[in-house]
Amino acid sequence: MPSNLQGGKAFGLLKAQQRDKLEEVNKEFMEDQKYRDEEDLAEKLDSFKNKYAEFDLNDQGEIDMMGLKRMMEKLGVPKTHLEMKKMISEVTGGCSDTINYRDFVKMMLGKRSAVLKLVSVCVRACFNLFSFCLVSVLENSVMQNSSSVFY
């Protein structure tokens, strides 16, 4: 990274580099025979990349305990410290205290325990609710704008 960048520019460059690394992993999943039959794989991987980058708080390519805590709280399903440790252990097979992107994608695409399935369902439910609300707001905005043209 060029040393003359400051603040937002440096952060933007760092995030772009992070997304490039995550995209490389996505390409590996796209080429993996095990995931060839996964419906809408490219879209799912793109969504996973964006969510993962949002919660990788230390920009080290891993979600640590604080990143997972933030994710769960933002999704409206806060977890205790012990529950989060269990989730990380299940995702990583007990090998790490952080979740790397490959493990995150495998978790989202593969079979998961009840705890992880619950989180996945909550993520999807929150996304669907957000999408519904966004569409409703946009429809209301369009209707208000079109009705004001006639007055």
Image: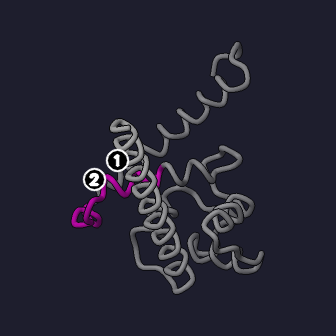
Q: Left of 66 or right of it: where is 95?
A: left
Q: CA distance from mark 1 to mark 2?
A: 6 Å
Of 87 and 48, which appears nearest the observer?
48
Residue beneath the point at 37% across and 58% down: 44
Of 33 and 123, which appears nearest the observer?
123
Residue on which disc 1 sits? 27
The mark total stands at 2
Rendered image: mark on residue 31: 2
- Viewport quadrant of the C terminus: top left
The quadrant holding residue 147 is top left
Q: How is the image coloured?
A: one colour
The part of the chain drawn in magenta is: 33-49
Q: Residues within 10 Å of mark 2 (few under 14, many from 20)?
A: few
Of 132 and 46, which appears nearest the observer?
132
Residue beneath the point at 40% across and 73% down: 110
Image coordinates of residue 33 in percent, x first then y, are: 25, 62
* 34 is within the stretch colored magenta: yes
| Identity, as a three-letter code, of the amino acid under mark 2 | Glu
Q: Residues within 10 Å of mark 1 (few under 14, many from 20)?
A: few
Residue beneath the point at 77% across and 75% down: 81
Image coordinates of residue 126 in percent, x first then y, are: 51, 67
Secondary structure of the residue carrying numbered label 1: helix
Residue beneath the point at 37% across and 45% down: 142
* 85 is within the stretch colored magenta: no
Q: Are marks 1 and 2 in contact (CB under 8 Å)?
A: yes
Q: Give the residue furthest to the front.
A: 151
